[in-house]
Amino acid sequence: MHADNSYFCTPNLEPEMIETHNINIQKTTSSKLPEIDFANLAFGKTFADHMFVMDFVDGRWQEPMIMPFQDMTMSPASLVIHYGQSIFEGMKAFKNTDGRFGLFRPDLNIKRMNKSAVRMCMPEIPEDIFMDALSELVSLDHQWIPTGELASLYIRPVLFAIDDYIGVKASQSYRFMILLAPVNAYYTKPVRVKIEREFTRAAQGGTGYAKTAGNYAGSLYPAKLANDQGYDQLLWTDAKEHAYIEESGTMNIMFVIEGKLITPSLGETILDGVTRRSAIQLAKDWGIDVEERRVSVIELQEAMNNDTLEEAFGCGTAATIAHIEAIADGESVYQLPNVEDRKLSNKMMKHFIDLKKFRVNDPHGWMVELS
Ligand code: COI
């Protein structure tokens, strides 16, 4: 038997273990703001002045800290490097030209992160501390929130295993961090996708619904092959039959067929996207029929052949609403209707921007304004 056989997940916290929410804040003395060209931001390459850090050690969360964005040292034996215990989230802060700023539905990301934590045998992050961390950090770096129509401050919470140990077990210590990155659009033009029927992203009983690093690592090689053939992304199909559309790795997928909004129903293999949920709600609010159900490749082929596929688009925090330009299935490539003619996805895209910039009513209370 292995010397350390503690395969068990770290116990969930009891509330009294958190003694204080006071975040220890060390501000930078040399802001990088003046160096940033906000009009030419490449996605994910520029980071704001500060980051949030909180470790989980000895069964409890340690002092929450905000500090200047900086490199960190790690043991080469850190468990995350070897066995991949790492989960993350993607969220965004928005600002309008009047200076009002806020977060879009942070509660859903917080809940999803904790769902991923349970699946990956990691400690959950107390929701109130998570929310305080977001609001303190984004408020401190609010000057980093770009105001351009398609721009935002991308927020990357990440939790990973930091025990130094060689051997497969759940780590007992973890680091939770939140990074901020001012960004423009993730996809700068309509996306070409390929239906993937050979490789698998997720199977029943696996980790597909969790936002865990390995799901993305496993997608890279098939995505590279598709890239080499001229496609930006894959449309993953189910692991068992490769007959049903699931999601598109960087985003959920939606189709408009004969006026109805149709999207694969959630399950263990599909990420429960915040933009997906919001798009479904908006469509319902606008009186559009929405069907969340299994979507077969055959149904999609028929709709493409009969010209009844009116729109296809991806939904994601990074991607927002991403028009699909073409769908490849084996040797066949289907060109979709002109992007300018797509009523629903264009309306949705505009509405999301208006809502996130506080320009329209927010009947569901999705925006959490900060100051
Ligand atoms: C997000 O949409 O926030 C993601 O994490 C996906 C990734 C493509 C950036």
Image (spheres, rainbow, N blue to C red):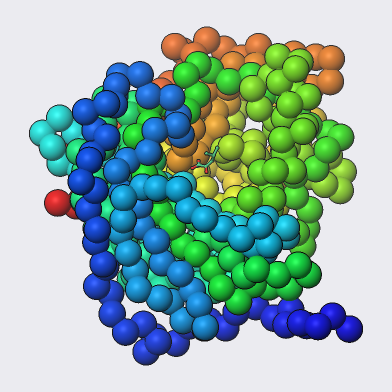
Instruction: Identify the residue at image location x=47%, y=53%.
Output: 72
Answer above or below: position of 297 versus 212: above
Instruction: Identify the residue at image location x=71%, y=21%.
Output: 227
Looking at the picture, tell me which residue is in the foreground, 323 or 95.
95
Location of residue 309 in the rendering, given as x and y in whole percent from the top left corner: 62, 22
Instruction: Identify the residue at image location x=24%, y=61%.
Output: 25
Quadrant where the N terminus sits is: bottom right
Location of residue 141 in the rendering, given as x and y in whole percent from the top left corner: 24, 45
Left or right side of 134 for 346: right
Left or right side of 322 for 356: left
Answer above or below: position of 98 versus 232: below
Residue 129 visible at all: yes
Looking at this rendering, what residue extends furthest in the left direction?
98
Answer above or below: position of 11 versus 367: below
Looking at the picture, tell me which residue is in the foreground, 264 or 191.
191
Instruction: Identify the residue at image location x=38%, y=24%.
Output: 41
Left or right side of 32 for 320: right
